[in-house]
Image (cartoon, rainbow, N blue to C red):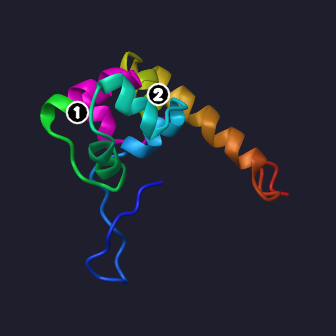
Amino acid sequence: MSNVSRIHSNKTPQRIHYIPEWAETRHLKQVNIVEELNVDKGLVSKWFKGTLPKPEYLEKLAALFGTDVQGLFREPHDDWLAKFFRDKTEEQKDRAISMLKLFFDQQGNGTGTDGK
């Protein structure tokens, strides 16, 4: 996970991008990205530390990770969920949400729908 600097020690840091998480999800190390994009290893290291890549590199990274540029600014696991719901009707979305709520209630600490 990247090191994100804090302006104030008591505040949560704001993420610029999720390039390290995308790389991890795709089982890619920095050296793999260097080789695939034919870029300097220092540049990739800066990206992993939070520096925002130039637009041409954002496009290449997105293609390498199998997402769009906007996807680089979201958690990789959020991406599949957004894609899953994108073409669904409101009724389908509501049913899926109800099923997920039921599933997680039953997986909780004994606080399922039966009240136990």
Identified by mark 2, the residue type is Trp
Q: Position of residue 107 (x, y in %)?
A: 77, 47
| Residue 68 shown left or right of residue 99 in the figure | left
Give the quadrant of the C terminus: bottom right
- Magenta region: 58-78
For marks 2 and 1, the one nearer the N-term is 1
Q: Say which residue label 2 marks.
A: 80
Residue 102: x and y in percent read: 68, 40
What residue is at 62 percent from the left and 36 percent from the top?
100
Q: Is residue 54 left or right of residue 37?
A: left
> In the depicted view, which residue is nearer to us: 28 or 59?
28
Distance from disc 2 to disc 1, alpha carbons, whole Å, reads 19 Å
Helix, strand or loop for disc 2: helix
Front-lying residue, 5 or 70: 5
* Residue 81 location (% of width, % of height): 47, 30
Residue at the image point whose x is 50% and y is 32% from the top: 28
Where residue 109 sits: x, y (%)?
Answer: 79, 59
Q: Amino acid at mark 1?
A: Leu
Within-10-Å neighbours for mark 1: few <14, some 14–19, many 20+: some
Q: Compared to 80, does 23 lie above or below? A: below
Q: In what element is the residue under mark 1? A: helix
As for residue 85 lying within the magenta part, the answer is no
Residue depicted at x 27% and y 32%: 39
Of the residues tagged 2 and 1, which is closer to the observer? Answer: 1
Task: Name the side, left or right, on which 21 lies relative to 38.
Answer: right
**Residue 68 seen in this snapshot:** no
Which residue occupies the extreme left position in the image? 55
The residue located at (32%, 70%) in the rendering is: 5
Label for residue 58?
1
